[in-house]
Image (cartoon, rainbow, N blue to C red):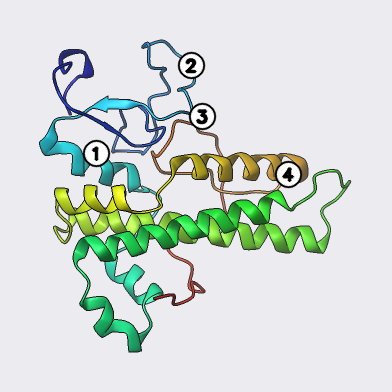
Amino acid sequence: MSDPSDSADRETYSLGAQPEATDRSDGASNGRSSDGTDGPVDDEAMGVPIPDEHVGAFVAEAFEDPERTTTWADVVDAMVAPDARDAWEGLSVAEQTVEVLGQAAEYDRRATDELERIPTNRGEPTPEIRSSFAEARRLRRNADAFRDGVAAAYADGRIDDDELVAAVEESDFDTGQIARREDELERVTSAYDFDYRPYGGTLFDEEQADGSEAGGGGRDPDIPETF
């Protein structure tokens, strides 16, 4: 990936609050602000100079979650009912990707809503709070797994650069929603000392913390068929 300092004449591609650079080896962001100093990156969208031929790879890397091994087939099996496969196959690859990203965004919204409803003024978590937290965590896993499946499809050559970029631009993909989801998750886990696996992707810059989420890897077997 080209150094932004010598790419002033290149087109910029904005992916929400995507940090300036990522390390594919562990998925952690570089934790530097836009002026090159240590500190948080602004929550607003930022343009990152990316050569045109690398935009697709940049987007796919942002979707990749190194903690997961989701495949495109996993996502299709989970999302598309058997009697809808013919209709699904009639869609272009970009249209299929829009559907997948849209479903992931819906899971993000539902997870955030579930977390927002959890009160944090209780001395101990009630059974209802534990149930709501488990459901929010399930929805969160599903959203991240669906995007990870899109990254796998790109890596396998099923989706090319133009198709991936077009799908992202047409879909409901929103890094701001993911950030809100994680803020709500931190609010609840801080109140009740719940264990969870910190977000493993690179869609926005956040301080990585040690922790684990039971059952956090891979896609959730209870994802409903939605297509």
Give the left or right position of residue 159, taking residue 98 as reference.
left
In the drawing, what numbered circle is on residue 39? 2
The numbered mark, 2 or 3, whose residue comes first in the sequence reads 2
**Residue located at (26% from left, 57% from top):** 152
Q: CA distance from mark 3 to mark 1?
A: 21 Å
Q: Is residue 33 above or below residue 61?
A: above
Secondary-structure class at tag 4: loop
Say which of 69 and 89 sits in front. 89
Quarter of the picture containing the N terminus is top left
How far is the residue under mark 2 from the one under mark 4?
Answer: 26 Å
Question: Of callouts 2 and 4, which one flags the residue occurring earlier in the amino acid sequence?
Answer: 2
The label nearer to you, 2 versus 3, is: 2
Residue kind at label 1, given as amino acid type: Phe
Q: Looking at the picture, how far across and down is residue 211, in whole percent?
A: 57, 42
Number of the front mark, 2 or 4: 2
Q: Nearer the viewer, mark 3 or mark 1?
A: 1
- Nearest to N terminus: mark 3 or mark 4: 4
Q: Earlier in the sequence, mark 1 or mark 4?
A: 1
**Residue with the most extreme front position:** 170
The residue where tag 3 is placed is 207
Q: CA distance from mark 2 to mark 1?
A: 22 Å
The residue tagged 4 is 193
Q: Which mark is residue 58?
A: 1
Tell me where residue 30 sits by quadrant: top left
Mark 2 is surrounded, within 10 Å at the Cα level, by few (under 14), some (14 to 19) or many (20 or more) other residues, namely: few
Q: Quadrant of the C terminus?
A: bottom left
Q: Is residue 131 left or right of residue 39?
A: right
Q: Residue 138: name its quadrant.
A: bottom right
In the rendered view, would you say 122 is above or below 99? above
